Image: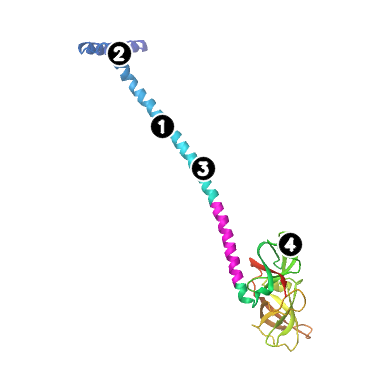
Amino acid sequence: MNIQSKITKALLVAILLLAGIMAYAASTGQLTSAPQNLLGTIAVPFQRLSASIGNKMDAWSDRSLNIDKIIEENEQLKRELAIMRSKQIEYDRIALENKEYKELLNIVDDVQQYDTVGASVIGRDGLEHFYSFTIDKGEKHGICVDDIVISADGVVGVVIETGSNFAKVATILSPNVNVGSIAGGERDVGIVSGNFDLSAGNMCVMNYLPKDTKVKPGDIVSTTGYGTIFPKDLIIGTVESVEIEDSGNSVYATVKPAADITDVKIVFVITDFS
């Protein structure tokens, strides 16, 4: 059977089917509505498909709007979280500073004799061997070069440079910082300063002790108050060991600072003292 005969047969079947539908419609009195019914029957699937596609498009549109809203809300939450974190950092800093102030009152008998400015450590020189650092207060807060820097635990160092709103501090681990000091029951006098080899272990040295010194491990080392820079009786640290100089003429002691020089975060600058 060739293609033409197949087409002819298909058309014949369609005509017969249509004639049957027309005959049925005539017998039921629905002849006038038959074309509409037929067209309706044919159109319904397409209408359903079109409606389904439209619903899906609406759903995707709604979903797109929801995603945009979620993204916007997420960004807003991120901004609020950043603000909350910033406030928490400031709260923690204030709480730590208040704690340090309370502890400072316990190590100074009459803290009113000192004018102090509280400050936070905001930077350290990673290439500097003696743990110098920068604080967030400076000249406009009354801080000057040679002002003494302490923590709630003890002496930390000396201001060596100032700006309007910052100051750089050299610590007692530096050989450039020299502190008149006393130690032991006999209150032997010496000079505490930094030492290159000891600084890596957060230690310094008390030089020029007398050969017959009674200073021993565990003794408290404090400032003498001689001169115009350091007030007296500030805690420096404790004696770790006592050694004789190579010359044999004097004795020195290794000293563990009371303050954690390598990790101090809150300090107090003494801007004036009686």
Q: Residues within 10 Å of mark 2 (few under 14, many from 20)?
A: some
Viewport quadrant of the N terminus: top left
Distance from disc 3 to disc 2, alpha carbons, whole Å, reads 54 Å
Q: Main secondary structure of the magenta part?
A: helix
Asked which secondary structure carries label 3, the reply is helix
**Residue 49 position by quadrant:** top left
**Residue 233 position by quadrant:** bottom right
**Residue 251 position by quadrant:** bottom right
Residue on which the image places disc 3: 72
Q: Is residue 145 magenta?
A: no
Q: Which residues are magenta?
A: 81-102
Distance from disc 3 to disc 1, alpha carbons, whole Å, reads 24 Å
Q: Amino acid at mark 1?
A: Lys
Percent of width and height locating residue 235? 67, 77
Q: Residue shown at 36%/10% (left/top)? A: 4
Residue on which the image places disc 4: 139
